[in-house]
Amino acid sequence: MTAPASQIPPAAERRTDQPVEPLLDVRDLTVTYHSGKVPVYAARGVDFALAPGETLGMAGESGSGKTTVAMSLLRLLPAETTVTGEIRFRDEDLLAANWGRMRSVRWAEASVVFQGAMSALNPVRTIGEQIVEPILLHEKVGEKAARARARDLLDSVGVPSRRIASYPHELSGGQRQRVMMAMALACDPHLLIADEPTTALDVIVQAQILSLLTDLVRERGISLIMISHDLSVLASTCDRIAVMYAGRLVETGPSRQVIASPLHPYARALAGAFPTLGDPGSRLAPGGLPGDPPDLREEIDGCPFAPRCPEVEDRCRSGVIPLVRRGDRAAACVHVTGYDEAVGDG
């Protein structure tokens, strides 16, 4: 019997006498798109791990590579894409798995709540048919049992089960997003990837969806990767945050620490871009960044953030700036305490 969500502490607060093997271990992940004449280096040497039951938020401005990394985990990128490195899920390298194995992993072991439910749902099939489909594909149950589970799933996400025969266009935006969550949970996966799950929803519905998602993940003990531009959303939902810029991880750490005291200048800029309610100063002088992110069709020497960084030095402009660990945090910046010693030791 699953414990109530209130009794399950966040993964960052859990204690164990034995080291926990990661559910997901990503090493040196590099993703290159080849759809045009010039390759686009969308992700470069990304490393992170996710423990069972842990929640990780991926932040960064548009084009930073966060969705590319998330979709590469289940090999959902276009055929004209090269993905190298290791994606170890439950101690199996998914990049080495054949397509038959990948079909069995998707939905049953790891699933996705896609951005924009109206685009992700099939407009000519009822929501019930779409929830039932992965259950019938991955589990040895009959149509009647699968439909009963679909009704239960709809009720669990706050959509009345009587709407099981409805089509996507007959539901509100918030209800469609809840249907996407029901589909993603249909086969009890170990990992849920939520790609901007509250895009285009009003703030009240957004809060409801985030609260529901958090409760469902913790009640079921599911690991979560959530992608968002909004650091405040990630801070309230996730145990840890990973900040991406120009296809690279530039900072990782516990959510509240990354928000309250970012180590990387880019993470500080992201955190400062959100106005403080009730503070006229932040409203009249909003944060922001000059310039634009680098062109990912070109090789980048040095820190990719250097052209926009207010703290740039000559040594930032050449070589590879690695992630340097400080306890349970890490940042790819020459100004991080201990950077010179860590690079020298390496």
Image: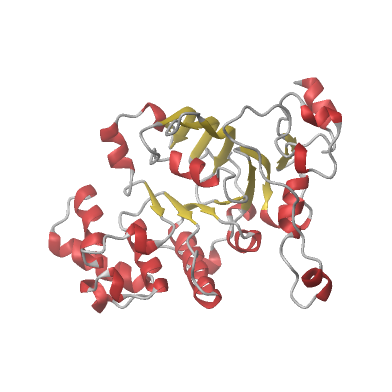
In the figure, 109 relative to 10: above or below? above
Classify residue 242 as left or right of residue 346: left
* Tally of numbered discs: 0
In the figure, 69 relative to 316: above or below? below
Q: Position of residue 64 (x, y in %)?
A: 59, 44
Residue 326 appears in view: no
The residue located at (28%, 40%) in the rendering is: 103
The residue located at (74%, 23%) in the rendering is: 319
Nearer-the-camera pick, 206 or 147: 206
* Quadrant of the drawing holding the N terminus: bottom left
Q: Position of residue 42 (x, y in %)?
A: 54, 36
Q: Position of residue 135 (x, y in %)?
A: 23, 55
Quarter residue 316 falls in = top right
In the figure, 233 relative to 243: above or below? below
Nearer-the-camera pick, 92 or 312: 312
Residue 33 appears in view: yes
The residue located at (84%, 33%) in the rendering is: 338
